[in-house]
Image (cartoon, rainbow, N blue to C red):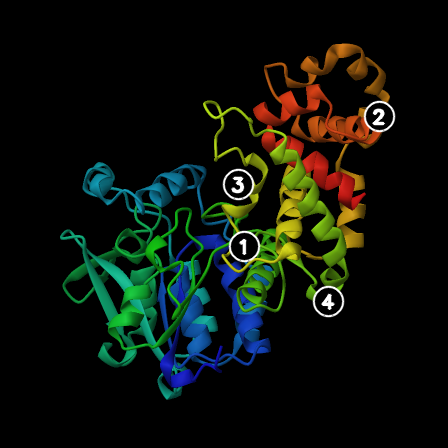
Amino acid sequence: MRPLIPSETALVLGGGGAKGAYEIGAIAALEELGIRAGSVYGTSVGALNAAMYAQGDMDIAEALWSSLHLQDVISAESGTLADDVENLFDHPEKLLEFITRYAQQKGVDVAPLQEIMRRNVNEDAVRRSTVRLGVVTTRFPTLSMVEKRLEDMEPGSLHEWLLASASCFPIFPMKTIGSERYIDGGYCDNTPVEMAVRAGARHIIAIDIGKHRSHAQYDRRPNVTYIRTAHPLGGLLTFDPELSARNRTLGYNDTMRAFGRLRGVTYSFDPVAALPLYSRAEDFLVRLTQVEAGLSSSNAITRKESAAPLFSLLEESLPAHADAIDYFLRACELCAQIAEVNPAQILTPEALRDELHAHLPLAKAESMLGSLLGGRVGALFAPPQLDRKLVISCLYHLLQREGTLFPLAMHTLSAFPREMLCALTLQAIL
C-alpha cells in the first residue's frame, strides 16, 4: 500500500455517545502510523472528536475521554431511551412515529455538554487548521440530512453545529439554529462515509462505533479502510473512565490490525511472536483436514462436498489470502471468545495460553473425565443452558485421553462443530 497523502485522505468518525473513546484510540494509532487526514467528517460524538482532530490537539481529546462523566445530567428515563434511539438509527421507517411520541419532551439540560464543547474545541484554531471539517445533522420535521462544512458555517457558530449534530432527541432537546430545528445526525447517517466521497476523498478511513453497522457496502472497497470492533463497547450513555480506557485500547489495536501492524481478526496478536507458530499451524490444519475427511461419505449417493464444518467456521471471517498462521490464530480467537478473554490487549502465544488457563474450568473438566468416559457426555449438552467453557474443556481432556477422534467425538463434532474446533485448538495451544 502506497503512503496516504493527507490532501487525498479523509477520516470519518461515527456517532455512538460514550463509545467515542474508541475513536480516540483509533486516531492515536493513525498518528503512530504516520497517517494524517486532510479532511475529517463526523456525526454526533464523532463530530466533537472530528473538531478536536481538526484543531490538531489530540492531547485535549485524550484528557477529555479519560475523565468524562455525564451521570449527573442523564436521568434514569433518558438511559432507557438511549437503546431505543440507537436502534432507530437502523430503522428510519419508525423514526417519525418515535419522534412524534416524544414531541413534547424537552430533554435533559445540555449546558454541561455545551461547556464540554466550549472548553475543548477552539473554533479559531479549527478555522486556522489545514484540515477540512464537516458534520452531519438532521433537519426537523422533514428529517432530511444536512451536511455542514466548516466553511459554510457562520463565524462563531461551530459549537452550535456540533450540538445540532449531537442532539440525540429525545434524550437531548432539539437544537435551533436560525429558524431551523435539528436533531442528531445519526438518524440520517451515523458514519458519514458518503460525505467524504462527495468531497472528493480518494482514500477514506471510517471508524464505525454505532450499535449497528452503517455501511456494510464499504467493507471491502480497496480505497476505504472500514474499522469496526467485534466487541461490545458499552451503551450510548455509559460514560465510565475505566470503560473508556478499554475502548481506547480496542480502537488502537483494531486500527493497527487494519493496517497490518497486528495480526488477527477479532483479537490482536503480536506479529513477531506469531511467526514461530508456522509449523504448529500447519500441523493443526493437517489435523483439521484429516478430521473433516473422516466426515465424508464414500457412498456416491450420500457424499456431500460441503462436509467442512471446521474450516467453514474459520473461513467465514478470514481474507482470501490467509496463510496457515491466520487460520490458526482465527481458531485461537474462537477459543478466546468462548473463554471471555479480554480483547483489549496484544496477545502472544504464551499470553493466550495463560489467559485460557485462567478463564477455562480445566481442572473441573478433568475431574469429570471418569463419568464422561462412562457414557455421561450427554449431561454436558443438556438444557437449560450450555456451559460452553466447560464443554470445550471436557472435550479437550477427552481428546487428550483418547488421542484420537473416537466415535462419540465424531458425533459431537456434527452437532457442536464450534466447540469441537475449540477443543482441537486447545490441544495445539496448551
Which secondary structure lies at badge 1?
loop
Q: Position of residue 45 (x, y in %)?
A: 41, 60
Q: Are marks 1 and 2 in contact (CB under 8 Å)?
A: no
Q: Are marks 3 and 2 in contact (CB under 8 Å)?
A: no
Q: In the image, which is nearer the foreground, mark 1 or mark 4?
A: 4
Residue tagged 3: 312
Instruction: Decide if residue 12 is in sight here.
Output: yes
Residue 87 is drawn in which quadrant?
Answer: top left
Q: Residues within 10 Å of mark 2 (few under 14, many from 20)?
A: some
Residue 194's place in the image compared with 314, above or below, is below
The disc, 3 or 2, on the residue closer to the chain's N-terminal end is 3
The disc, 1 or 2, on the residue closer to the chain's N-terminal end is 1
As measured in the structure, the alpha-carbon distance from the residue carrying label 1 to the one carrying label 2 is 46 Å
Q: Position of residue 157 (x, y in %)?
A: 28, 74
Q: Are marks 1 and 4 in contact (CB under 8 Å)?
A: no
With 141 as the anchor, is 334 left or right in this view? right
Residue tagged 1: 69
Residue 63's place in the image compared with 348, above or below, is below
Q: In the image, which is nearer the foreground, mark 3 or mark 2?
A: 3
Residue tagged 4: 272
Q: In the image, which is nearer the foreground, mark 4 or mark 3?
A: 3
Residue 82's place in the image compared with 218, above or below, is above
Residue 242's place in the image compared with 63, above or below, is above
As measured in the structure, the alpha-carbon distance from the residue carrying label 4 to the one carrying label 3 is 27 Å
The disc, 4 or 3, on the residue closer to the chain's N-terminal end is 4
